[in-house]
Image (spheres, rainbow, N blue to C red):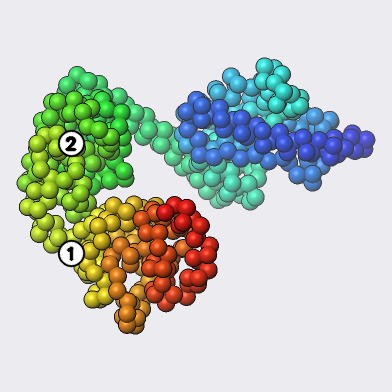
Amino acid sequence: MEGKSLEKAIGYYDFHRRLHNDCCNVIQDLIRRLLDRKKLAYNNISGRVKSRNSFIEKCKKDKYAQWNEISDLLGIRIIAYLLSDVDSICEMLESEFYVVESIDKVGELGDNEFGYLAKHLILRLSHERASLPEYSKYKDVCFEVQVKTLTQHAWATITHSRLYKAKSDELPNDLARKFNRLAGILEGVDEDFQKLCNDYDNYIDEITAKIRKGELDVEINTASLIRYSKEKFSHSNIHMDFANKDSAIINELMKFGITTLQELNNIVPNDINTKIVGIKNFGANLTTLFRQIMIISNHKLFFERSWGGDWISTRSLSKNGLLKAYGIDGASIMNEYKKLIDEEIAEQIAKNELDMDITVISLIRYVNYRLNTDKIARNLDGKDVDIITELSRFGVTNLRELDAIIPNDVVCAIDEMPKYSTNITKLLRHIMIIRDADKYFTTCWSGSWPDMRGPLGGLCQKYGLDTVELKERYFSQVTNAG
């Protein structure tokens, strides 16, 4: 393309630049909504309008006689996970848009060739969608959609600037061999991932069929426990996840002597769904539920053999609705094993094994071991629920996360303050304010201490906070909430 044709193409580009930019954003959003609606898996969606210089250089190539032969002026890229996902996404696109052209890069390679693999679709809005007011101005815009796996995208990204358009027969023999070997490996990786996922899906189908038949001689793992739970527990407030503690609960079940679904089923009360329905405001994930089931079955065995030390609280056991429904006194159990629990938590903290949940006992033991000063009273001032909730809102749910926000010199700082005294609740509030006052007051503050003088004095000033300014900034919030 040259002369007047090239000038016309450049004029077209300049005149429609804003339209194409807007269209690019609209199409990305539309495709994303379609994928989400149809529950199709994808990693990322991106789009671009070809730059003016790139467009001009492409127009100058001999194979283009007219600017409208360039189909990738507006481009969308969809990165999928698996080869099957690529196929599903392409099927969706072909059903939702008008297909101008479909290009399968796999088909462009010979039987003995390796290289860039992806599916390209040249699309326009369908007649039905283009007739809607919000899409009508884009009815004549063509756009190219590339759909590829993560592996294919990695190949394309790495080779684009160094080996763009290169084929193995255009390279020196030693580079050609390396080119083909690497391309073949990546192609094999995609196929192996696809096979692995197919095998996993087949496994899920197999164990689901067994569970429905009552054939429960299946080893416990994350997948089998979820499938069993979906079939066994009917209450909608049982969340079918482990709160990222699937390894912990599987380990606890195995220490309890449970290695198969049949052994698990043997300790699940037959009337558990009926009991749960009768509990007001019941809610639990699978980790919590299975722990409660083990306690109901044999609390002595659970605490002496299975309990991992990463959760416990007197309040959670004494007020546990499911335990009460089966006549179990959680407070008595707690008192029975308090010494064991204290010793195990203290031992874990001493070993710097801090990946345990924030609880009343774990907080007290942590302060005893890590913050050794007489100026901190070893109690939570009856505010255990409040401070644990505030810590959670601050992003602190275990002792390791708590340890990360505590200044290394905090004990020295406290000891240098002659009149300073506090309890664990107030200390932790001081620490959160020191770490990030704005975050604490906007997302964590629970309204349980409306007096600004206590929390913002002493230790906060020691770490350079302007407590007067903080009082002025948050006074209205505290007053209104109070």
Residue hosting label 2: 322
The structure residue drawn at horizontal position 90% and vertical position 38%, both measured from the top left corner, is 7
Residue 64 found in image quarter: top right
Residue sitting at x 73%, y 38%: 21
* Left or right of 481 in this view: 75: right
* Quadrant position of residue 293: top left
Q: Amino acid at mark 1?
A: Ala
Q: Residue furthest top?
A: 128
Q: Is residue 311 above or below residue 20?
A: below
Q: In this view of the protein, which residue sits in the foreground, 405 or 245?
A: 405
Residue matched to label 1: 346
Front residue (pair 346, 364): 364
Residue 25: % across, % down:
67, 37
Relative image position of residue 342 (x, y in whole percent): 14, 60
Asked whether residue 399 is in view, the answer is yes
The mark found on residue 148 in the picture is none
Residue 173: where, in percent of width, then height?
A: 58, 48
Of the two numbered discs 2 and 1 on the same chain, state the one appearing first in sequence: 2
Residue drawn at the location 34% of the way across and 81% of the way down: 417
Vertical arrangement, residue 269 with respect to residue 458, above or below: above
Left of 299 or right of it: where is 247?
Answer: right
Kind of residue indicated by mark 2: Leu
Between the residue at mark 2 and the residue at mark 1, the CA separation in whole angstroms equals 29 Å
